[in-house]
Amino acid sequence: MLPVKYRLTQDRDFKRINAGGKSVFSAYFRLRYLANKLPNSRFAVVVSTKISKKATIRNRLKRQTREILRLNREKIKDGFDLIISVQNRALGRDYEELKTDLAVLFFKGNLLK
């Protein structure tokens, strides 16, 4: 689990990022990001009910994605708010595939240190 200071929780932050942020896509994820004025980056992982009606499946995808973020947080540039949306194609993929795809996503967005 990510510590609280690395989480996006406020609705106004989500609206701000969705209104003015940049988007980057990969095979399994969509990333929307926007600079913030904080010394660290904050993350949110979103899995829609369109992906699966079963909460256990959605929660598993969220847990896997958050764990990847937790382990690679120091490789990501500071000062950004990021919303990671999981796409349909991520269903049934193993952890390593998700990990490499997320790394590609951060590389595309020029968010790696």
Image (cartoon, rainbow, N blue to C red):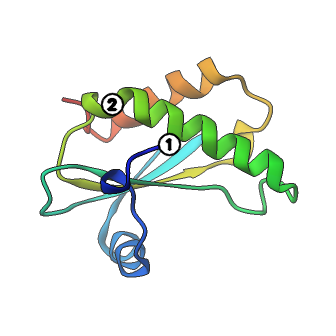
Q: Quadrant of residue 34?
A: bottom left
Residue at point 42%, 34% (across, down): 70
Residue pointed to by mark 2: 107
Earlier sequence position, callout 1 versus callout 2: 1
Question: Looking at the image, is 106 positioned above or below residue 14?
Answer: above
- Callout 1: 10 Å neighbours few (<14), some, many (20+)? few
Question: Looking at the image, is 1 positioned above or below residue 79?
Answer: above
Q: Which mark is residue 1?
A: 1
Give the Cα distance between marks 1 and 2.
23 Å
Is residue 27 at all visible to an observer of this figure? no
Whole-percent x and y of residue 98? 59, 28
Judge by depth and name the residue closer to the eye, 40 or 88.
40
Disc 1 is placed on an element classified as: loop
Residue at point 32%, 34% (across, down): 73
Image quadrant holding the C terminus, namely top left
Residue at point 24%, 54% (across, down): 80
Amino acid found under the numbered disc labelled 1: Met
Q: Residue furthest right?
A: 54
Q: Which mark is residue 13?
A: none
Disc 2 is placed on an element classified as: helix
- Callout 2: 10 Å neighbours few (<14), some, many (20+)? some
Amino acid found under the numbered disc labelled 2: Phe
Whole-percent x and y of residue 13? 35, 74
